[in-house]
């Protein structure tokens, strides 16, 4: 069945997991927090947040300008990170450990079949969704309406709610030079995206409430425009 950010907590439980909630009443307080943590939501429910007060920054399994993207995310006020399962694997390969991220952001991970953390969108916690960097796989899914990962589900639900999305696509030119993981024998890799990847980027440009960026400079400029529109400013410094 399709993934939905507003799905109820799973029933049946698991050995060592939290006690199964009563399905006849909504979860509240500490009980809601325990279930959220079990499913990858590391923090309080979205109802605790002022409306439209945060950026939702989604990370996929791409290393293309990954460090530059995270540097931009650090400069923004009130950012939550949404990691795909692939991002969980790839981030440490570029020296970006989960512990380091949690010191700087609130982090939500793709640990549930129904993308439970997406429910924060329904509570109107976010004014902007960013996917940076976005793999060609993520671009294709977004362009064709598939939402089976945490970032693609965030993108789909944001579009349905009219929340603007900024997508920094990786495979946008006939030749792409990208930084290799630190464990790789060479520092840089040369890739040649296929016509299908380039076509998917163009298709994504036509999706409502979506803006596609192709360079870190374009991403920075688009974020600056959002900050200006929201009457916000870059952080003074980041570490």
Image (cartoon, rainbow, N blue to C red):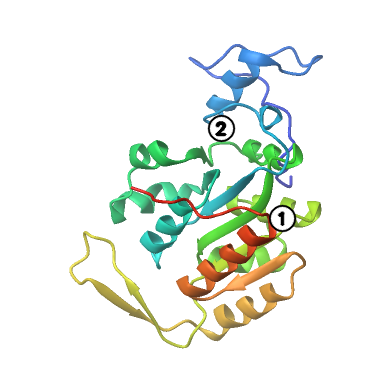
Q: Which of the two residues, 42 or 149, is positioned nearer the viewer here?
A: 42
Q: Pointers 1 and 2 in contact (CB under 8 A)?
A: no
Residue 44 is drawn in which quadrant?
top right
Label 1 Cα crowd, 10 Å radius (few <14 / some 14-19 / many 20+): many
Q: Farthest residue in the bottom direction?
A: 174
Q: In the rendered image of this protein, does residue 23 appear above or below residue 162?
A: above
What kind of element bears circle 1?
helix
> Residue 50, position in %: x, y?
70, 35
Q: Which mark is residue 36?
A: none
The residue at the point 80 percent across, 14 percent down is 25
The residue at the point 41 percent across, 86 percent down is 175
Q: In the rendered image of this protein, does residue 35 appear above or below residue 157?
A: above
Q: Which residue is mark 2?
A: 41
Q: Give the mark, 1 or 2, whose residue is nearer the N terminus.
A: 2
Looking at the rendered image, the quarter that the N terminus falls into is top right
What kind of element bears circle 2?
loop
Q: Which mark is residue 156?
A: 1
Residue 31 is drawn in which quadrant?
top right
């Amino acid at each position: 069945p399709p993934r939905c950010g507003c799905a109820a907590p799973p029933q049946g439980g698991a050995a060592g997991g939290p006690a199964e909630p009563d399905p006849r009443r909504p979860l509240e307080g500490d009980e809601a927090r325990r279930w959220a943590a079990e499913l990858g939501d590391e923090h309080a429910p979205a109802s605790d947040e002022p409306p439209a007060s945060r950026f939702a920054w989604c990370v996929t399994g791409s290393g293309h300008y990954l460090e530059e993207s995270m540097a931009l995310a650090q400069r923004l006020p009130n950012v939550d990170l949404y990691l795909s399962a692939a991002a969980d694997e790839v981030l440490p390969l570029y020296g970006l450990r989960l512990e380091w991220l949690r010191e700087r952001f609130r982090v939500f991970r793709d640990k549930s079949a129904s993308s439970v953390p997406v429910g924060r969108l329904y509570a109107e916690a976010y004014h902007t969704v960013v996917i940076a960097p976005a793999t060609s796989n993520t671009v294709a899914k977004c362009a064709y309406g598939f939402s089976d990962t945490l970032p693609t589900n965030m993108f789909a639900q944001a579009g349905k709610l009219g929340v603007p999305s900024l997508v920094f696509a990786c495979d946008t030119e006939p030749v792409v030079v990208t930084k290799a993981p630190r464990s790789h024998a060479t520092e840089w890799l040369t890739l040649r995206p296929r016509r299908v990847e380039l076509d998917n980027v163009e298709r994504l440009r036509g999706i409502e409430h979506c803006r596609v960026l192709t360079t870190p400079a374009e991403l920075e400029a688009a974020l600056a425009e959002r900050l200006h529109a929201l009457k916000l400013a870059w952080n003074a410094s980041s570490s």
